[in-house]
Image: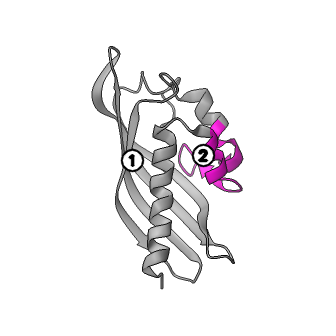
């Protein structure tokens, strides 16, 4: 069973991801996901090595003065654990974007994150896998260089 502190640590990892993306700190994503398979286009596509996530983001996500002008909202998180030092979550995400003069505020994508986490011997929690599942796209023309992935 997870302690309250463990639950907060796991949930904070979800929110750190959103903060890093929305601030344009794509290199920070490579650190966050280091050593972790990240399925950016669903579980049926090859995983991106965690260390490469930042490079993929730099390649595909449009930025404006260094930021993508997005807000990644992570909601409806279900947190489960069957063993000490292991946890998994299922969350909903909604990506809002507003680019003045280009795109009014709107939803550009929504979907789900299926994540797994492990706790190291020092008690620090980290991602051990992420699967992104996009359920719906809006106008992603100001968000992505390609419409094939929502990051």
Left or right relative to 146: residue 51: right
The residue shown at (67%, 73%) is 120
How far is mark 2 from mark 1, CA to CA? 19 Å
**Quick check: 53 above or below 69?**
below
- Front residue (pair 82, 7): 7
Q: Which of marks 1 and 2 precedes in the sequence?
A: 2
- In the rendered image, residue 37 lying in the magenta stretch gets the answer yes
Q: Residues within 10 Å of mark 1 (few under 14, many from 20)?
A: some
Q: Position of residue 59 (x, y in %)?
A: 62, 28
The residue shown at (60%, 46%) is 29
Helix or strand or loop: what does disc 2 sit on?
helix
Left or right relative to 3: residue 103: left
Helix or strand or loop: what does disc 1 sit on?
strand
Left or right relative to 123: residue 94: left
Q: Residues within 10 Å of mark 2 (few under 14, many from 20)?
A: many
Pointer 2 with pointer 1, Cβ within 8 A: no
| Callout count | 2
Dot 1 corresponds to which residue? 111
Q: Position of residue 122 (x, y in %)?
A: 67, 76
**Quick check: 149 above or below 39?**
above
Dot 2 corresponds to which residue? 29
Q: Position of residue 71 (x, y in %)?
A: 38, 39
Q: Please give the range of residues in magenta.
A: 27-54
Left or right relative to 125: residue 19: left
- In the rendered image, residue 62 lying in the magenta stretch gets the answer no
Residue closest to the far top: 101
């Amino acid at each position: 069973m997870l302690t309250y502190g463990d639950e907060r640590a796991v949930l904070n990892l979800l929110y750190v991801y959103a903060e890093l993306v929305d601030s344009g700190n794509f290199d920070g994503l490579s650190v966050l996901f280091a050593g972790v398979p990240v399925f950016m286009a669903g579980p049926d596509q090859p995983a991106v090595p965690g260390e490469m996530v930042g490079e993929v983001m730099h390649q595909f996500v449009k930025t404006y003065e260094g930021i993508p002008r997005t807000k990644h909202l992570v909601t409806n998180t279900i947190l489960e654990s069957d063993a000490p030092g292991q946890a998994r979550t299922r969350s909903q995400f909604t990506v809002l974007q507003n680019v003045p003069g280009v795109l009014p505020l709107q939803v550009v994508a929504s979907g789900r994150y299926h994540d797994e986490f492990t706790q190291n011997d020092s008690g620090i929690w980290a991602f051990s896998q992420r699967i992104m599942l996009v359920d719906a796209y809006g106008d992603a023309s100001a968000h992505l260089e390609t419409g094939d992935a929502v990051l």
